[in-house]
Image (cartoon, rainbow, N blue to C red):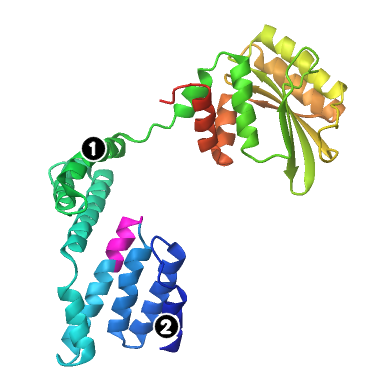
């Protein structure tokens, strides 16, 4: 019992919405349950409900577990014992608001699971209606708030039925037709990776370096140089970009603003479109030649590769903020 008690005390009293506290309380409950201490188990699970705030299904499971433990005390122990009386008190005094909140959580969670697994059958049920009615009866929420929540819950149901919109990043980035705007968006994304240096260097004497960023790759300082183009990469556009990419490596960048000397240099040609099929083999041959004959590390980053990088590096919120900064609508 000592270990469980120590775990219970370890979390302190401020456990609201703390996953670590939830795990600790569940561990204490498991130990007490194994030791035949159902009342202590129920108390641990009641606090676990508060610790699981924000995760409705887990809250519901913890609440049900606590009630089962208190019911076990009432059934198994003499009615005049302190534990049985305390457990009965807990069962009788479970606030009506808590029961209504659990009704909302339970029915809403079941409804969304139903819409995912068997939408046709779920449409014939009214579990969301039951959930919203329970929500409206909670005094601190009331019918006005419940009614205000209906459109958003309905929107979530529609998204569940129809699937999430996954191409918003492609559409938003692809809609940019001004290279200055695309450069600023890319700069914000690079800044989101917390580089040691990042700057737009576009200008009449940029030598192919629209943007430069100094990153750390496992302790290796990497200078990343970006040439930025808008739209489809066709033959005339490629010829211009090719000359700029060659200048990128032929003319070294000043290290005046760099905190350390780069140990490796990487070049990137970034576009919010793709290479068309006529220029694609020419580009492929040139990139291979640069790698083979000159040892240059140059990557072509088209729209899909750009979006893939954004999601893999978890820069989605940075992208939304950058698009908002440029007044670009996200749809």
Residue interval drawn in magenta: 54-62
Residue drawn where x is 16% and y is 41% of the image: 123
Residue 200 shown left or right of residue 167 in the figure: right
Residue in the foreground of this view, choosing between 296 and 260: 260
Q: Find out whether residue 55 is within the magenta segment.
A: yes
User: Looking at the picture, how far across and down is residue 82, in whole percent?
Assistant: 22, 90
| SS category of the residue bearing label 1 | helix
Residue 260 shown left or right of residue 152 in the figure: right
Looking at the rendered structure, which numbered label has been put on residue 4? 2
User: In terms of sequence position, does the residue under pointer 2 or pointer 1 come before the other?
Assistant: 2
| Quarter occupied by residue 180 | top right
Q: Residues within 10 Å of mark 1 (few under 14, many from 20)?
A: few
Residue 90 shown left or right of residue 203 in the figure: left
| SS category of the residue bearing label 2 | helix
Residue 175 shown left or right of residue 124 in the figure: right
The Cα atoms of the two marked residues, 2 and 1, are separated by 43 Å
**Residue beneath label 1, please?**
154
User: Looking at the picture, how far across and down is residue 60, in whole percent?
Assistant: 27, 62
Residue drawn where x is 19% and y is 70% of the image: 94
User: Looking at the picture, how far across and down is residue 284, in whole percent?
Assistant: 71, 21
Magenta stretch secondary structure, dominant: helix
Residue in the foreground of this view, choosing between 227 and 21: 21
230 lies above or below 123: above
Q: Residues within 10 Å of mark 2 (few under 14, many from 20)?
A: many
Which quadrant: the N terminus?
bottom left
Residue 235 visible here = yes
| Quarter occupied by residue 305 | top right
């Amino acid at each position: 019992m000592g270990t469980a008690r120590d775990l219970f005390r370890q979390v302190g009293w401020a456990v609201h919405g703390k996953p670590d506290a939830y795990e600790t309380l569940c561990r204490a409950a498991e130990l007490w349950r194994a030791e035949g201490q159902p009342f202590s188990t129920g108390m641990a699970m009641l606090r676990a409900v508060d610790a699981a705030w924000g995760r409705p299904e887990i809250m519901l499971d913890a609440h049900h577990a606590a009630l089962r433990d208190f019911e076990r005390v009432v059934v198994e122990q003499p009615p005049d014992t302190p534990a049985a009386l305390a457990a009965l008190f807990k069962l009788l005094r479970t606030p009506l608001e808590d029961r209504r909140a659990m009704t909302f959580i339970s029915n809403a969670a079941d409804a969304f699971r139903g819409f995912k697994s068997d939408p046709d059958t779920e449409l014939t049920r009214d579990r969301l209606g039951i959930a919203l009615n329970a929500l409206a009866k909670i005094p601190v929420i009331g019918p006005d708030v419940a009614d205000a929540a209906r459109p958003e819950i309905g929107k979530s149901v529609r998204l569940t039925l129809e699937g999430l919109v996954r191409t918003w990043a492609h559409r938003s980035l692809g809609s940019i037709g001004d290279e200055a705007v695309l450069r600023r968006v890319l700069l914000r994304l690079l800044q989101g990776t917390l580089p040691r240096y990042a700057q737009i260097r576009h200008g009449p004497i940029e030598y192919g370096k629209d943007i430069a960023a100094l990153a750390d790759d496992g302790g290796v300082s990497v200078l990343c140089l970006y040439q930025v183009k808008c739209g489809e990469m066709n033959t005339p556009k490629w010829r211009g970009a090719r000359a700029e990419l060659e200048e990128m490596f032929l003319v070294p960048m000043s290290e005046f603003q760099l905190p350390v000397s780069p140990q490796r240099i990487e070049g990137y040609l970034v576009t919010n479109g793709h290479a068309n099929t006529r220029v694609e083999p020419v580009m492929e041959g040139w990139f291979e030649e640069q790698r083979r004959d000159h040892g240059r590390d140059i990557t072509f980053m088209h729209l899909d590769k750009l979006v893939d990088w954004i999601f893999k590096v978890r820069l989605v919120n940075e992208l939304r903020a950058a698009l908002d900064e440029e007044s670009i609508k996200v749809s």
